[in-house]
Amino acid sequence: MKIVRDVAGYSMARSDLVRRAMSKKKMDVMEAERQVFIHGELDDSGNITVEGALRRGVKEEQANKIYDQMIDFANYAFNKSHAAAYAVIAYQTAWLKKYYPVEFMAALLTSVMGNDKKVAQYIMNCKNMSINVLPPDVNESYVKFTVVGDKIRFGLAAVKNVGENAIQSIIANREEKAYTSFTDFYKKNDGKVLNKRAVESLIKCGAFDSLKAHRSQLMNVYEKIIDNINEDKKHRIEGQISLFQNMQESSILQEYLPDIEEFEEDMKLAMEKEVLGIYITGHPLKKYEKLLVNKVSLDSSMIDNQEELKEIGIKDGSTVTVGGIVTQKKNMLTKKNTMMCFLTLEDLYGSIDIVVFPNIYEKYSQLANIDSTVLIKGRININEEQSSSIICETIMELSKFNDNKSSNGKNSVEIRIPEMTNPIIDRVKSILVQHPGETPVVLSIQNTNKKFKSNKNLWVNINQKLIHELSTTFGDNNIKVYGENEEMRK
């Protein structure tokens, strides 16, 4: 802003417009502004509104050179001190992630605890790093995400309806001895800080699973147990000797759990989603995971990352395919009295907004319903100010593609390379190490017709970004992905 004011005589307001264009990387605006910067600008009456560099005695060649430097920043550049600080932070965090991956991911999850979409994304990252994220537990969880051996335990602060006072009470009252049953848990915690709503949320998220009680059993009797304990406390008079003092526990406080089966998996997952905002012990789309990798060109973790979209060749208006489960639906009548709708599609990482206009809605209304598992093809609408969305063109049932056919009996990625040379192998490794996972990689050497299976430290997590990088480097026809579904279509 100071450069354009001092060199070309811009006003404060006009210089701020240049700054905004630079920060948004609007190259068309920056190039149009070059002429004003060098030659100035006149209003309709011929009055000078911007002097320009030439009127201020700066040669045109020098003015262009100065402006070229600003254009570099509009493309992508950092102030030196800013870049140095970023480099130090990048080095420190990379070192921590390499040598203390579990601790690093626990801290990362804690830093985004209020953002369900980010938490879901980082839990998937943990999975790809072979780090297991465990559900909340009344005997192990603390306020934040914590490390338990080589695993991460979910923090109690992430459970809805469980306040700070309740969490501190739960942690303090297990210090001497761990909770042995649901009754033991409630007796040790004051009902004033731990109400029924909080207890129900803890049951639903699986926080009592380690006490050997089914969630279905506790949901059936927890209110009765709580009422009995509260009633017993009310009738106790300080100093009074109980008739049952020699008994371990009065019969009214014995924990009787009904002999019923545990909830179905889908029900347990739905309850976890209700109180945690995300799925922990599984996901309704788990059975479609490899199919989604094969069919979709975009997932929710990428949709608002414009740099990543640019890397995989997606721009505003590009046709993309997304897949997942419909979790929300809002119908709306247009001015022409036709029905359209807005959908929220949830995949393994988060959610995507879908817009279904009347002509498409009329055709696919039966599939555009809550709990439908679908593939949606459409045009991406990239929005810099808010979340991007997909303008729907077609909707397909996901289950119709899940034929469970295997092309070679197991999952693998095959990379065809012309010859086994150090530069080529280094290029392969540089891509694979960025996507660690459990899928084996096979190198097919074209000049010798031999195949080699990579070391386990180069096995990968199959995702669209990996396939795009491999295809860009070695060619579409040289990358083959095998698994439960047909060969991946790019």
Image (spheres, grey):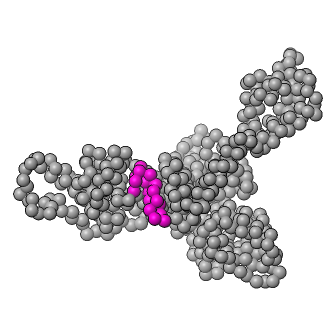
The count of marks equals: 0
The N terminus is located in which quarter?
Answer: top right
Instruction: Find the residue positioned furthest to the bottom.
Output: 449
**Measuring 23% from the left and 54% from the top, which residue is drawn there?**
187
Residue 149 falls left or right of residue 48 = left
Front-most of residues 350 and 307: 307
**Residue nearest the observer in this picture, 258 or 55:** 55
Where in the figure is residue 127, as x and y percent of width and height? 54, 64
Residue 432's x, y, as percent? Answer: 68, 67
Q: Which residues are magenta?
A: 141-157
Q: Nearer the viewer, residue 291 or 55?
A: 55
Residue at position x 65%, y 76% from top?
A: 455
**Residue at image location 70% in from the left, 53% down from the top:** 309
Determine the residue positioned at 61% across, 45% down: 387
Q: Is residue 127 above or below residue 313?
A: below
> Is 270 in the magenta?
no
Q: Where in the figure is residue 487, as x and y percent of width and height?
A: 67, 73
333 vs 63: above or below: below
Taking the image as drawn, is residue 377 in sight? Answer: no
